[in-house]
Amino acid sequence: MEAAVRRVFPSDHFKVADDQWLISAIGTAKDISDKLGVTPGNETGPAIVFSMANYYGRATTEVWDWIKVKAEQPSA
């Protein structure tokens, strides 16, 4: 996956951990998945691709815990 991220988004990624990246790109999560070769039938391997509409600033642990809970809730 790292090779794909560096190849497809050479200046638009941030490595958070050995197997986690933040990518700045225009397109849907499926578009990014296709470009990285994650979509079934491609060879890069498994991954989870999601989009965020907004992010900004600093937060306490409580804020991040809240975000985690909300992200795990089923969509309305």
Image: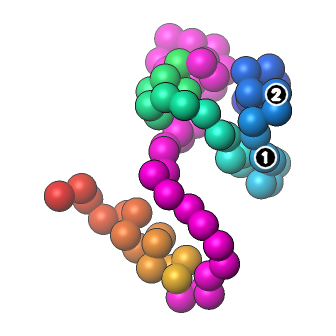
Residue range in magenta is 35-62
For disc 1, the marked residue is 14
Q: Residue 38: give x, y in percent of width and height.
A: 57, 24
Residue that lies at the very extreme toward the left in this rendered image: 76
Q: Residue 55: give x, y in percent of width and height.
A: 56, 62
* In the displayed structure image, the side of residue 30 where residue 59 appears, left or right: right
What is the quadrant of the N terminus in the image? top right
Q: Residue 60: give x, y in percent of width and height.
A: 62, 87
Image quadrant in which you'd find residue 56? bottom right
Q: Residue 36: give x, y in percent of width and height.
A: 63, 22
Calculate the distance from the C-alpha at mark 1 to the C-alpha at mark 2. Answer: 10 Å
Q: Circles 1 and 2: CB distance less than 8 Å?
A: no
Magenta stretch, overall SS: loop
Please, what secondary structure does the residue beneath circle 1 have? strand
* In the displayed structure image, the side of residue 58 where residue 54 appears, left or right: left
Q: Is residue 2 visible?
A: no
Q: Is residue 52 above or below residue 4?
A: below
For disc 2, the marked residue is 10
What is the quadrant of the C terminus in the image? bottom left
Residue that lies at the very extreme toward the top in this rendered image: 41
Check residue 58 for magenta coloring: yes
- Pointer 1 local density, CA inside 10 Å: few below 14, some 14–19, many at least 20: some
Under mark 2, the amino acid is Pro
Image quadrant in which you'd find residue 23? top right
- Which residue is located at x 38 percent, y 64 percent? 72
Q: How many marks?
A: 2
Check residue 47 for magenta coloring: yes
Please, what secondary structure does the residue beneath circle 2 have? loop
Under mark 1, the amino acid is Phe
Q: Nearer the viewer, residue 3 or 27?
A: 27
Rendered image: mark on residue 47: none
